[in-house]
């Protein structure tokens, strides 16, 4: 709606055409895949490091308990 108090339309700023929604979604998809891959690699590394800790802890507790009961 045009302002009734103006004799001519309001000036418009020059617009530049930016990236399309498809281009933005493709870039976002690539970023998500890249960072998800890195996160999964870090999780795999952590899982490899902590594998067997539960068993080690249980054996340690069992050994400590049996040593305590022997004394």
Image: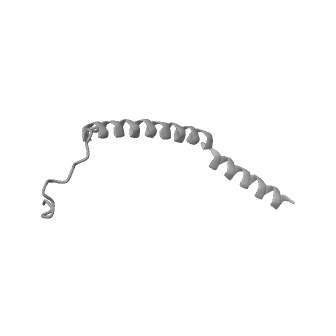
Question: How many discs mark residues in the rendered view?
Answer: 0
- Residue at 25 percent across and 42 percent down: it is 14
Q: Residue furthest right?
A: 71
Q: Position of residue 1 (x, y in %)?
A: 13, 60
Q: Residue furthest bottom?
A: 5
Q: Residue furthest front?
A: 7
Q: Is residue 70 left or right of residue 7?
A: right
Q: Position of residue 60 (x, y in %)?
A: 73, 51
- Residue at 31 percent across and 39 percent down: it is 24
The quarter of the rendered structure image containing the C terminus is bottom right
14 or 5, nearer to the observer: 5
- Residue at 40 percent across and 38 percent down: it is 31
* Above or below: residue 29 compared with residue 68: above
Q: Is residue 15 left or right of residue 51?
A: left
69 or 44, nearer to the observer: 44
- Residue at 27 percent across and 39 percent down: it is 16
């Amino acid at each position: 709606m045009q302002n009734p108090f103006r004799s001519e339309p309001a000036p418009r700023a020059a617009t530049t055409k930016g990236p399309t929604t498809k281009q933005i979604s493709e870039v976002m998809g690539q970023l998500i895949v890249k960072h998800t891959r890195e996160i999964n690699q870090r999780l795999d590394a952590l899982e490899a490091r902590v594998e067997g800790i539960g068993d080690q802890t249980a054996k340690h507790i069992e050994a400590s308990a049996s040593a305590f009961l022997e004394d």
